[in-house]
Each structure stands twice: as structure tokens, then as C-alpha cells.
Amino acid sequence: MATLSKKQHAALDRIDALTAGDYIKLLDANPPTDRQWAMLKFHHASPKHTATARELANGAGYTLPQAATLQYGIFAGKYCSQLKIAPPNKIALFVTFLKPKLSECKLIMRPALIKALNMMIQAKNKGG
């Protein structure tokens, strides 16, 4: 595993400190595209909020897993820019990673983002 710089560690610490309210503010201030929402919703609805890049691609209508991770990275990158943080992987704003032996990497949605999406879905269902 590569050694992280102090700046990357600081970025991950800031991401870890984000609240559901912080994610809601980010999403409201710069709304995702339809495909980005599709990926977020699919990921949110996945068992244990965990999916592989291949599963995210299928859920958002992309042909290749690389397309999904590229789009997730671009999506997360605009929020990283707003927050003025530079994590080692921009997708880390939305997920943590689990790399089981002999299987695909699993992307686990961050708890604060899960909570934010729960709140946003609940507000939408109430007509708010």
C-alpha cells in the first residue's frame, strides 16, 4: 500500500468528519446529474450499501465498470474541489474500500452519506 502524504491524511480526516447535513448541503448546492443520482440511489439500495464497480455500472446504465468508477470519481471530485480537499482517491468522499482476496473491490457507502440520502428520500416522500 502506498504511503499517504500529510495532505491526503488530512483530506481523509475531513471526510471522516463530514455529517449527513454536510452531504445534504453539497448535494443541494450542486445537484447530481440523472446518471449520478441513479448510481447513488443504486448504491444506497444495495445490500449493506455495498457494491462493486461492475454492480454500480449495471445499476446506472454503464457498460463497463471503469465507466462507473470514472463517473463516480468525477462526481465526487466536484465536491472535493468545493471542500478544498485532495484525498488519495476522490471516490473516498463517498465510500470506503474493501478488497477481499480473489474478488472484486467492494465500495462501501459512508455512513454519513447513507444518513443524508435517507433524510433526503424521506423528505421527498413527504413532499418536501
Image (cartoon, rainbow, N blue to C red):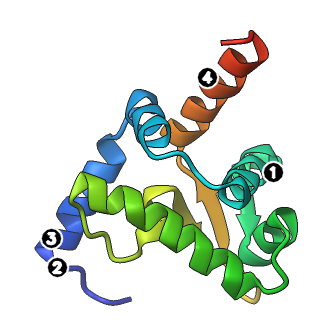
The residue indicated by pointer 2 is 5
- The dot on residue 7 is 3
Task: Calculate the distance from the C-alpha at mark 1 to the C-alpha at mark 3.
Answer: 32 Å
Label 2, label 4: how many angstroms apart (C-alpha)?
34 Å
Q: Distance between the residues labelled 3 and 4?
A: 31 Å
> Is the residue marked by circle 1 packed among few (<14), some (14-19), or many (20+) residues within 10 Å?
some
Q: How many labels does the image show?
A: 4
Front residue (pair 98, 65) = 65
Mark 4 or mark 3, which is nearer the start of the sequence? 3
Vertically, is 18 above or below 6?
above
Residue found 52% across the figure and 61% down from its top: 96
- Give the number of the disc on residue 46: 1
Q: Distance between the residues labelled 1 and 2?
A: 32 Å
Question: Would you say the residues marked 3 and 2 are in contact, meaning their CB atoms lie under 8 Å apart?
Answer: yes
Q: What element carries label 3?
A: helix
Which image quarter holds the N terminus? bottom left
Which is more N-terminal, label 3 or label 1?
A: 3
Label 2 vs 4, first from the N-terminus: 2
Residue in view at x 69 percent, y 75 percent:
68
The label on residue 119 is 4
Instruction: Tell me: 48 left or right of 115.
Output: right
Residue 100 at least partly seen: no
Amino acid type indicated by mark 3: Lys
The three-letter amino acid code for the residue at tag 4 is Met
Q: Residues within 10 Å of mark 4 (few under 14, many from 20)?
A: some
Res 123 quadrant in image: top right
Residue type highlighted by circle 2: Ser
Amino acid type of the residue that numbered disc 1 sits on in the rendered structure: Ser
